[in-house]
Image (cartoon, grey):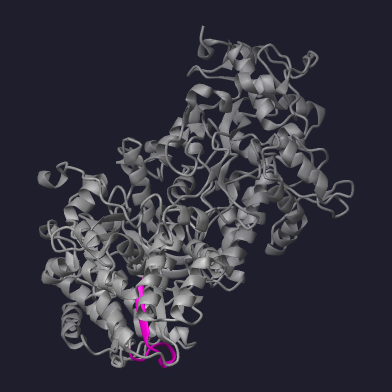
Amino acid sequence: MESLTEKMPLTEPPQVLLHPNQRVGADMVRWRKAGGGKALVRAVQDPAFVREQIRVSDLRGLGGSGFPVWRKWEAALDELPKPDKYLVVNGNEDEPGTFKDRLLLEQTPHQVIEGAVVAALSIGANRIVFYINPDIKRPLVALRAALDQWQSSDLLELASTALGKPLGLVLCPGSGHYIGGEETAAMAWIEGGFPFPRGKPPYPAQAGVHGNPTVINNVETLAHVSHIVRNGGAWFKSLGRGAGAGTKLYSLSGDVLHPGVFELPMGTSLRELIFVHGGGLLSGKPLKAVFTGGPSSNLLTPVDLDVAMDFDSLRARGSSLGTGAMIVVSEGTGIVKRVAEYMRFFAHSSCGQCPSCKTGTATMSRLLDRIDTGEGTVADLNTLKSLCTMLPGSGRCHLVNGAVLLLDSAFRHFHEEFRQALH
Amino acid sequence: MTAMTKGIYFTEALARYRADSELGPLPEPVDVYALLNAYHPDYLRDSLVKLAVGANAGDSCQRELAELLQAEAFIDEADLAGTPVTDIDVLVIGGGGAGCAAALMAAEKGARVLLATKLRLGDSNTVMAEGGIQAAIEPDDSIQQHIQDTLRGGHHAGDPALVSIMAADGPEVLRWLIQQGMQFEQTTGGDLHTRRAGGLSTPRLVHCRDYTGLEMMRVLREAVIQHRSIEVWEQSPAVELLSNETGQKCVGAVLTSLLDGRLRIVRTRSVILATGGLGRLHLNGFPTSNHLGATGDGLVLAYRIGAQLRELDSFQYHPTGLLHPAHLSGKLVTEGVRAAGTLLVNALGNRFIDELQPRDVVCAAILRECSEGRGIRVDDGRVGVWLDTPRLERARPGLLEKQFPNLMTRTKIAGVDPRKQPLLTHPTLHYQNGGVVIDVNGATTVPGLYAVGEVAGGIHGRNRLMGNALLDIISFGRRAGAAATANRDRGPKKVTLEHVNRLRRALTIAGMPMTLRSPQVLPDYATGGAWNR
């Protein structure tokens, strides 16, 4: 393991989202002094320029999808308002191990709001809904204060004039359900219902909130918009490493010395994140596995340490970047228990409208709990394996797929551990 | 000449002793704080170290305690694999008076309760409380006076909110205890009999002979065993608490078993720590009056999960622990004996302090006599002073036998008759004044975690008055039991050791060694150190 702990040259990572100038909290005066608001002025003059820069920048949906932002925007731009057009800022952030959006909302709320207003201008949206996890108290306070400052600011007036109709900024605390982060579920909650996801199509860009064309973007995605507009899409793209574009907030947690949020070039290797920025593993234990993007994706193992952490490279490995959360697990941690815990999370989070997901996640959770507490049998393990082939694709949203993906990859990498836990 | 070799030899001093000798006048009272500063063990600055990590980083405490607070945990995530899980509403850790009161109250409020105790139910310091329980019930007494006495006795370091609520609970606590079936001494008229104690402005001590705590434990233990909603796990010490995934909420505990050594996970909405004190750490080498399990586990567990502690450097040394015979070393002679009029006499046959001063003052005065050569020395070199029981017997014949049967039995077995021979006594490590910071409901600074009894701090300031411990455990025990039941959290609980990782990070960054493991669970001399490896 010597090679893992070897010191690597520490290059100063580019900080754009978390630049000290930006981290002023809900203080509009300081934020304007640091250059805040310029992107909005630019967007008022030339919305087409904004769209072009976003396309050039290769900005992706950083909430986990990795879908190119410009294509989402293009689709919404082509729709006529019926009579409104919505932009939803998704800050539901409820996945285990993810804590980047709350940091942005608390420390740079104006950056997020400006990005949202710029986005609204370039797609012609006249209603912006900030859809935020209700359990993150301090970020909510900061965002509320920042929104109050916007309501009476000249920037909002400028945007409304350019848009030709009033631009509404609304804060809508979410439901507190994990499933509420799914885009159709978010829209259902904003409309006043329980956050049930629904099937697609119609896509939100065609018929979203109250049937209006809707774009839903993650907090981090929109926060990037303003400096892309200021400095150009090519500049942003060049911040990335390899195939990755721009920077990414990685939420590092688990058995590392320095857990936290790190803004690093998209495409940084897992090794650099853990051993340079994270200070290495706690108590010098060897690395066992990494849960990426929260629980709903494949596990990474020590052989994946040098994979570039961008959407495409991880997808090629059969994993996904997800929200950029990396939960590090060292030797000495039982995988079975961890997977059982995540499955409990999925079973609890299932909204229950698709029977296969409702009973599937609950059954998987129950079987895993049995195995974890030393009462499982070979039959239980075989049932779990069968479920892994039966369940994927059977739900309206991806919850059940994510649950299976995790279990399946845990089986693949740590099958022996499951066998040993049997009765 | 060191303190150890000073003093007059035991047999010589005993031969010289006369119960009817003329006692010299009490010396002029010295400045209390000067006395404490010079002789009380809490003020031995050399034995204090600063904590480097945790919620109390920067505070000082005794080296023995600091080592445990800043040690590695016993268990790792890997140890939890395949561990059986128990789900319960309220987990009470500790089977003494506070734990039983909390469990009973929680069960009365409708919770399913698991009471886990390190040794057996009732193996505690509660049973050793001899003097009594304070409650302002006399006509010329008041709650206000009780509050004032308690705060003054604690050198005004206590939290007035906690003290007020405890004093106000006093009469109700007595009523509850009587309902549970507890016996108290009565006057001929049938009222509860009260007596005086050190630091009290008026008689306020309600008691049952000289085994009040034992009597209390008898009824509480029976009530707990009989309650159908309370499950009791004996010989099941807690080795770690469990936290949620951010490590900031307590969601359960890991218990082990002294019988089979296996771990068990308990998931719960609320954990009530009622683990008692730490006498068995033998701070500064003092003997202790505490029972075998008093190793400060609760402090360690609470500190590791992030709870704030207070008055960590403050301990009560009971002035009159037995020194002779050697196998009773550290055992208490109740303050009630002094309250009844027994005097303290040095080797020269002189009184040296008002015996009913607060305990810390009397203790410092005894240590002064010992180190200045006016003590009585025994074979192993330790030094003490006389507790002049024969003189009391002369003044009030029969009183000892009637009011202090516990003491009489114990000394009789050891072959000493306190009616004829004075008892050789020396301060003994008795009580942890500080502890986990709590509010009036026993809630700590960590959500889901409650602390009651000796493990909690803030009530007794820097010195506890006699009789307030028994009141404290019932008053706050009942409050915490009710509050813990009312705590209704939703959602699945992910149980992790994230708080342990947090401590490991902090220790690594602070460059501290992580060689020792804690909690201690049992003293090394009881296990050959098996728990600490």
Residue lying furthest top: B1
Residue pictured at 73% horizontal, 40% vertical: B151
- Tell whether B328 sits left or right of B363: left
Does the magenta run of residues contain A207?
yes
Residue A94, quarter of the rendered image: bottom left
| Residue B52, percent from left and from top | 42, 36
Decide if residue A194 is in sight here: yes
User: Which residue range is magenta in the image?
Assistant: A206-219
Quarter of the picture holding the C terminus of chain B: top left
| Residue A415, percent from left and from top | 13, 69
Decide if residue A97 is in sight here: no
Q: Is residue B2 above or below residue B395?
A: above
| Residue A18, percent from left and from top | 36, 54
Does the magenta run of residues contain B31?
no
Taking depth in this image into account, of B328 and A232 the one nearest to the observer is A232
Residue B256, quarter of the rendered image: bottom left
- Tell whether B419 sits left or right of A242: right
Residue pictured at 47% horizontal, 19% vertical: B380
Q: Is residue B278 above or below residue A128?
A: above
| Residue A331, percent from left and from top | 20, 54
Taking depth in this image into account, of A380 and B183 the one nearest to the observer is A380
